[in-house]
Amino acid sequence: MASLLNLPLELRDQIWAYLSSARDKSLLDLSHPAKAERLDALRSLDALTRTCMQLKAEVANFLYDTVYLELTHPNQTLQWLTDIGPTNSSSIRRLVLKFKILGLCASKDTETNEYAWTLAMRSMPKLQDLTFQLERDADVAPTAGPSKDSFSSDSSLLESLAASAFACSSISTSQEPKMRNSWNSWLDYRPLLRSHSFTQALLSLGEPLPSPLVRQVNQVLSLPFAVSSAPVRLTTPLDKYSMEKNMTGLTAAFYLGHGFSLTNTCVFHENSDKTDAFLTFSRLAVQDLPPRNFLQDMLHELPKLGYLRVGSPRLDSSFLVHVPKHVHTLDVAFTDDDPNTIAENLMTMRGICKKLFTLAIAVSPLHDRDHEGEDPKYEVFFERKAVAPATAEKWQPFWNAVDEIKASRVKTWEGEGPGFKRGRSA
């Protein structure tokens, strides 16, 4: 009699892949106690993992390869990790946490918070991408004090995390294949952009958000949110230069210490009614390129944008021709060594964006400069006369396009785009 275990491993893998892809990715909703029983639904899906040791090892790698959690607060992840056990947590490669309360709520006991998340990281030895998705609406207030999900006095949870981390300590990742493209977290779980009239977008793709723009995002995140017609503000101060600490309650040093860096930041804002913010952390050794048409597809879903900031060392100027027509403020930083192509794309963009009022543009390699020892919070004004004659000749088509745009009464700044080497202005 034929049996499942008698099938070739390659065929069983196809079966597990099909079953895992068919399940509802938004199933794990832990954002409300009444919905916590939905975890049982997942347990029914992975019933195969409790059949025998062989199936347990095979199926867990597919069911828990990519996990999407909806939570009230990111720290609920810690209890969830102990609930699923080390076999399943050690299979997680991509984890997306969607929540509505800032991670600042856990920062009162920073040392315990970092210790608990250290154990959590060790419970996910194969983790490659970690995405935090903050979703804020006008009718949801941020908490000002310690969250009920704080675990500072919950020694039993810390003990369970420690046991899980110890059980995962023998799992080797040295022979793991190269991680999949880290842009998948965005592609799979981005918000329905067209369902909201987003008017502002700040995108740092493949690089952290520069310090001046972190301050700008802080203003967005700490806007008053109406609750019963009464405005509520965060009383816990936001960190001036740290998106990591503001959204997750953990510092950049914490993530770097565990081999992760902030690679993608996406913030979408609709006046004071709606904000979606994404932070994606990826392992340092991986240098992924954005998939083809990644940015242009996104921009097509944001037709009402008035303000757009795009910074990425991995994008060329081709995205400029897809900038939404209502944009009036455009701040771009990208990499492209073809001045003629950049000039063509700039002029096409100008023809589309007839309401354009402000343009800040930085192009690598032209605007890359090194200012050792100077404060990186200050911008440097680019001086065309400072470049070598051969460089000036090469980039003249680009400058002609910039000057033509400036002549059309658009306020233009060159070489100030965040994301490149900056120093103090003279």
Image: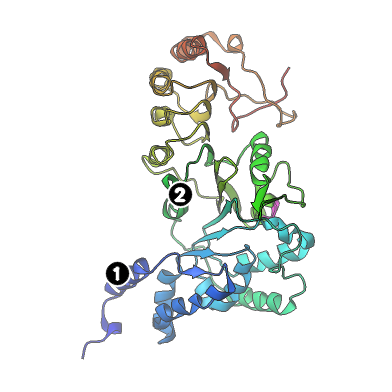
The image's colour scheme reads: rainbow
Location of mark 2 (residue):
183
Q: Which residues are magenta?
A: 250-254
Residue 381 can be seen, yes or no: yes
Residue density around tag 2, few if under 14, some if 14–19, many if 20 or more, within 10 Å: many
Location of mark 1 (residue):
14
Residue 137 position within the rendered picture, expressed as x and y whole percent measured from the top left: 58, 52
Mark 1 vs mark 2: which is more N-terminal? Answer: 1
Query: In this rendering, is residue 372 above or below 172?
Result: above
Please, what is the three-letter code of the amino acid marked with disc 1? Gln
Answer yes or no: do the residues labelled 1 and 2 have beta carbons within 8 Å? no
Which part of the image, by quadrant, shows the N terminus? bottom left
Q: Secondary structure at mark 1?
A: helix
Query: In this rendering, is residue 213 above or below 370?
Result: below
Find the distance from the CA under tag 1 to the CA under tag 2: 24 Å
| Position of residue 248 in the picture relative to residue 57 (left or right) | right
